[in-house]
Amino acid sequence: MRTINYSAMRSVGARVFIAIFLLSLLSSQAFCVETQSQPFFVRVLVAQDRTYLPITVKDKYAIRLLPSLKVVRIGQAMARERLVPTPKGFRLGSQEWEASGIVIEPKKDRDLYLDSSRFRGIALIYKQPNGLLYAVNRLSIEHYLYGVLHHEVAPWWPMEALKAQAIAARTYAFYQAQVSKANDYDVKSSTSSQVYGGSTTERYRTKKAVDHTAGQILTYQGKAFPAYFHATCAGITAAAKELWNIDLPPISGGTKCNYCRISPHYYWQAMVPLSVIEAKLKENGRPVGQIIKIEPVSRTPSNRVGSLKITGTAQEAVIAAKDFRIWVGGDLMKSTDFAVTIKEDLAEFHGKGWGHGVGLCQWGALGQALLGKSCKDILNFYYPQSTIRNIDIT
């Protein structure tokens, strides 16, 4: 993950929040995305660190400036015009505008392309403090989920498992939208939030699961909570407080799960060169020299590694296992439930599960659905004391 001054980026959101709110209500000569009602919107960070953005709109569109919402262009179509940052603001083709951001509004849904990725809704584009561009896709939460589910679960899975994932993902997005109102975006399009691929990656059965559960979220004592999920818990779920500063009964962990034994990620192993680990430690401000020993020094209540002591030729360092996993790579070190030995110039990891282990276990949900469990059964199992609530978001 690249280091970006997101606090500075998000401060722009505080200045334009009212403008964006008015944008959803505004009726003028400019075009708005065609919808049958006023949906609940989410804002997804879909591009960052860009020196330029190729933009395509297949049919009619309008461009507004932020924060004024002034319409500066209405066009019939746009074919891969390059948007570039300038000292004054932004330049698109031969036009340059002084603004803190721009809004691209296609008349028709799914007519917008950033690079080769197709999106529903509208695009809001800003400049980072370093002058590079970042883009936010603003769209209804249901349409957002259309572009999420296929990345999180396989479309061929039983419908009850897909529906459980849809409700969990909707809850997470709804919660993030509530706590991020003063920011420029609510969620990212990567695994740090929920993987989102725009409308290009929508699939029939995952869209059907979203439609079947439209408006349904999980609540605890009447309020939405971050309904985290992961691929494979490998026997027991973790508590959110093991990783983050949050402690709520539905995500307090300790749920014993035998349903994910069918997962190909139940067991894993990884061989990592010590030189790679040494470089990652140095890169993140924890240099130890040449590594001599790596040993777990604490375990969490779910028996995952809490912290590691790494002994090197220069010094020792005690590091949180969750940070160590991110530094080395989450796809390589699939979880913090592992044992480690050093063999010559390699660290050999043998582990269980994939992901942080909090909340819904996706392969466990598959296992339960194959045994005939309902969507509600699955959610009650992984989020105890939660309630499925229908909310008016359309």
Image (cartoon, rainbow, N blue to C red):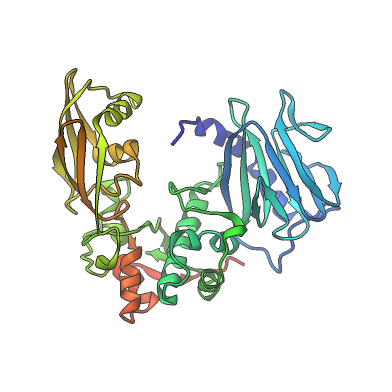
Towards the viewer: 169 or 76: 76
**At 53% across and 48% down in the image, what residue appears?**
186
Q: Residue at x 34, y 78 (%)?
A: 370
Can I make out residue 271 in this image? yes
* In the image: residue 297, left or right of residue 28: left
Q: Is residue 384 visible?
A: no
The quadrant of the image that shows the N terminus is top left
Residue 217 x/y as whole percent: 46, 66
Residue 371 x %, y %: 30, 80
Q: Is residue 365 left or right of residue 340?
A: right
Residue placed at 30% from the left, 64% from the top? 263
Q: Which residue appears farthest toward the top when viewing the image? A: 314
Whether residue 46 is situated above or below residue 1 in the rendered picture: below
In the image, is 322 to the left or to the right of 107? Answer: left
Q: Given the current orientation, which residue lies at the most extreme bottom position?
A: 372
- Residue 111 lies, in percent from the top left, at 73, 56
Answer above or below: position of 197 versus 156: above
Quarter residue 283 falls in: top left
Residue 253 image-quadrant placement: bottom left
Number of numbered callouts drawn: 0
Residue shown at 44% from the left, 60% from the top: 152
The vertical placement of 205 against 174, above or below, is below
Quarter of the image where one finds residue 102:
top right
Q: Quadrant of the C terminus?
A: bottom right
15 lies left or right of 160: right
